[in-house]
Amino acid sequence: MSDKLYDHIFIGAGPISILEALSKKAEGKSVLVIDRAARIGGAWGTTILPNGEDVEIGCHIWSISKPVFRFIDNYLELDMKPLKPQPVIYKNGKDIQYDWKSNVLTMRRMLTNLKHGQLKRLIIDWKSPAYRVAFIPSKYLYPVKGASTFSKALETKARQHDLTVLLKTEIEEIRDQGEYVDIITTDGSSTRCKEVHITSVSNVGRYSTPSKSFTPKLNVSNFIHVHFELSDAQGKKISYVRWVEDDVIHRISDITNQAKSDVERLIIVGVYQEAYESSSEEELQKRIMVKLRENNFIGESTALTNWQFNIFPTNYMDRAEFDSIEDAFNGKLKILPSTDLIYGMHHRLKDWNRLLLSSGK
C-alpha cells in the first residue's frame, strides 16, 4: 500500500475528470488520477491510419453552451470554429436541421413538466443547455483540428500543474474502510484517499463497504467506426450527419481538415455493432461505399484509397446502480456527470471559472 493519503482520487482520465482534478488541485488538495488507457482524453482519442495519419477515432459533435465554449477558449486556449456546413439529421433521403432534435426534446420535456405541475423543475430545465429551442440554425463549435488537440490541451494543463496521472492501470476494487477509501488495482497495490470520484464509464471490478459488496453489472458497448480515405472530394458537402433509420450507418463525419498529408477527402462512418458482427470488414466496407454513393455522400467516380475499422469498447453502469453505490459510501464516493461532454462541463462550470480562471490556474 502507498503511504500517501490523497484528498481525492479520480477513476478515469476523461476531460471532465481531468478538469475537476485540476480544480481540486487549485484548492490545494492532493490529487491522483487513474486510468486504464495509455493517455489522457477518454473517448476523445485518436487512431493511426494506414497512411500514418493520427486522427480522431470516431464521429463527434459538441452540444451547445456558450459559457462552456468561453471556458474552453479561455482556459484550454483551443481553436474552435463552427461546423460548416451545418450538421444535419439524415432521414428518408432528406436533410433535417440538427437543431430539430433539441427542439423536439425540449418541447416534450417542458410539456411534461407543465402537465405534472412541476414549475420548479421547468425553471431548472430552462436554465440547462440540454433544453433549448432554436429558431435559427445554431453554431456548433468544434476544435479545428479535431479531438486530438482537445486531448493535448488537457495533457498540457495536467503537465503544467504537476497533476499526478497513473495510466495503464486497472481498478480491481474500491473499498470503503470507514474513515478512508482504498483503491486497489489489479496488480494488488493499494492507494488510500478521503474521497473518490467516478463516472458512468469508470471501469471498476468491485465496490465494497463494511456492510455490503457490489459487483457492478456493466453494459458493454463497442463504438465501431471506419475511416475512409477517398480519391476525390465529390459528393455532398458535410460536417456531421446523424443518419437515422438505417441498419448499417448511424453517423458520418468529414475530417479532411485534420489530415496533414495531401488527402483528397477523409471521412469517418459510425457503424452499428450488429452490422459489424454479421459480415466481414471487407464485405461491410463495400456495402457502406454503396450506401454512401447511392445517397450522394460520395461521387459516382469516387474511389477508395485506404480504409480502416476501429473499435472503442466502453463499459457503463445504469443510473440506478450508480445511486445505490453512491449512497452506500456515505459521501466518500462522488459521481461526475460525463454522458454528454458539454452538459457535464456546464454542471461544474461555476467552480471551474472560480478556481481555474480567476486564480490563473
Image (cartoon, rainbow, N blue to C red):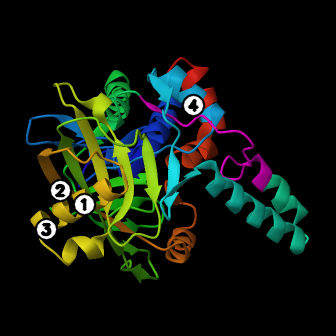
| Highlighted magenta segment, given as a residue range | 125-143
Relative placement, left or right, of 115 versus 331 is right
Query: Where is mark 3, residue-wise?
Result: 283
Measure how far apart labels 1 and 4 are at the Cα level: 38 Å
Task: Place residue 116 in its image quadrant.
Answer: bottom right
Mark 2 or mark 3, which has the lower sequence index?
3
Measure how far apart labels 3 and 1 are at the Cα level: 11 Å
Q: Amino acid at mark 1?
A: Val
Nearer-the-camera pick, 327 or 109 = 109
Of badges 2 and 3, nearer the viewer stands 3
Q: Position of residue 204 (x, y in %)?
A: 32, 67
Query: Where is mark 1, residue-wise?
Result: 290
For the point 54% across and 31% down, the residue is 27
Q: Is disc 2 surrounded by few (<14), some (14 to 19) or many (20+) residues within 10 Å?
A: many
Residues tagged 4 and 3 counted as in contact (Cβ below 8 A): no
Q: Amino acid at mark 4?
A: Phe
Q: Determine if the magenta segment contains residue 142.
A: yes
Relative placement, left or right, of 42 versus 342 is left
Mark 4 or mark 3, which has the lower sequence index?
4
Mark 1 or mark 4, which has the lower sequence index?
4
Query: Where is mark 4, residue-wise?
Result: 69
